[in-house]
Image (tube, helix red, strand yellow):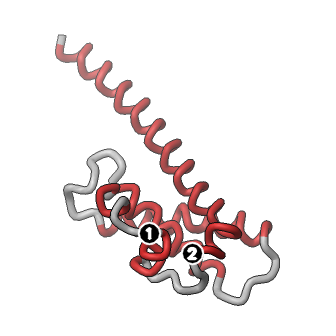
Amino acid sequence: MLVWGDSRDNTQAFKMLVEHMGSILYEVAIKERQRHHFNMKLFCMKITRMQVFFRMRPVIKEDRTLQGQLKFCGIDEVKADTYSKNYAYLGLMVDIILKDMEDEIDFYVGQYRKKLNKVMN
């Protein structure tokens, strides 16, 4: 999905990416916050899904407030203010992980292109 973009049916790839990154977020979140009154694992999955969704579709994100983004993605555990104060770091983590993945993809695609050019020439 990160290589080809959002132009194909990427339902399974999206799910795998969200589950992988959501589990990373959950591991961090349970260390950071010991008390919470909702399912933290599900909450981390929702945050990951929201960040990945809007990262792939930035035009949609710019038209929505934070509260609108949370509501759109089914995050009703917290309000926008609480999210901004206490949980925004989780969304930032998703952005950092995605950026690192994109950099790694760019590196390996570049290596592949170099090898392909050598074979073609």
Q: Where, quadrant-wise, is the N terminus in this rendering?
A: bottom left
Q: Is residue 3 above or below residue 71?
A: above
Q: Which mark is residue 80?
A: 2
**Amino acid type of disc 2?**
Ala
Question: Where is residue 7 drawn, in percent x and y?
Answer: 20, 55
The correct choice, above or below, for 8 with respect to 113 in the image is below
Residue 121 in picture, x, y percent from top left: 18, 10
| Tag 2 secondary structure | helix
Q: Assign a secondary structure to mark 1.
A: loop
Q: Position of residue 57 (x, y in %)?
A: 32, 58
Q: Identity of the amino acid at label 1?
A: Thr
Q: Is residue 74 above or below residue 103?
A: below
For the view shown, which residue lies furthest in the left direction? 120
Q: Which residue is mark 1?
A: 65
Q: Are marks 2 and 1 in contact (CB under 8 Å)?
A: yes
Of the two numbered discs 2 and 1 on the same chain, state the one appearing first in sequence: 1
Question: Residue 63 sits in which quadrant?
Answer: bottom left
In the image: residue 43, left or right of residue 2: right
Residue at 50%, 68% in the rendered image:
19
